[in-house]
Amino acid sequence: GVGMGMTAPVSITAFPTEDGSFQQKVKVSLRIPSQFQANPPSPTDESIKIEERQEMTIYSTQFGGYAKEMDYVNYAAKLKAALGSEAAYRKDFYLCNGYDPPMKPYGRRNEVWFVKE
C-alpha cells in the first residue's frame, strides 16, 4: 500500500536473437529505494520477484532521446563493434537502461550495458 515513485534506472534485460533483435522474453527491473532496501515490501502479484543484483563490472554506452527497442539494438551493435573481439562479456543478454520519466522531453539518458565476464 506504499508508493515508491519513479526509480532510476529502469533496467530491461534483453536476450538477443542471432540477428540482434530481442527475444520475446524480457525482464524489467526496478531499483528498490534505499529506505526499503533492508526490509522490502512483499509483492502481492506472484509474477513480481525481489532479487538482489550482484556486483558487476560493465561496458557501457550512452545515448539520448525516447529509446525504442531498435535504438537499444543499434547501440548494442555499436558497443559490440567498439569492444572488438578481445573484450570478454556475457553474450546471452545485455541490459537496457532508461533514467528519465516519460514526460521529460529533452536531455534524456539511456544506456546499454554489457556485463564483463
Image: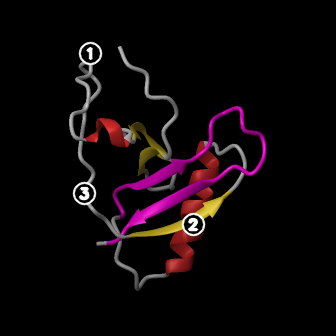
Residue 96 shown in magenta: yes
Q: 26 left or right of 109?
A: left
Instruction: Report the Cα–Cα distance between label 1 and label 3.
Output: 24 Å
Question: Residue 30 at x, y = what percent?
Answer: 41, 38
Name the residue carrying label 2. 61
Instruction: Report the Cα–Cα distance between label 2 and label 3.
Output: 21 Å
Mark 2 closeness class: few <14, some 14–19, many ≥20 residues within 10 Å: some
Name the residue carrying label 3. 54
Question: Residue 92 at x, y = what percent?
Answer: 34, 57
Q: Give the amino acid at mark 1.
A: Thr
Pick whichever of labels 2 and 3 is earlier in the sequence: 3
Pick whichever of labels 1 and 3 is earlier in the sequence: 1
Nearer to the camera, 15 or 43: 43
- Looking at the rendered structure, the secondary structure element under dot 3 is loop
Name the residue carrying label 1. 44
Q: Quadrant of residue 104?
A: top right
Q: Residue at x 62, y 43 (%)?
A: 100
> In front of the other: label 1 or label 2?
1
Q: Residue at x 27, y 51 (%)?
A: 53
Q: Quadrant of residue 61?
A: bottom right
Q: Give the amino acid at mark 3.
A: Gln
Q: Give the amino acid at mark 2.
A: Thr
Q: Which residues are magenta?
A: 91-116
Question: Residue 112 at x, y = what percent?
Answer: 52, 59
Question: Residue 7 at x, y = what percent?
Answer: 48, 39
| Vertical order, 50 against 64 (above or below) | above
- Looking at the rendered structure, the secondary structure element under dot 2 is strand
- Looking at the rendered structure, the secondary structure element under dot 1 is loop
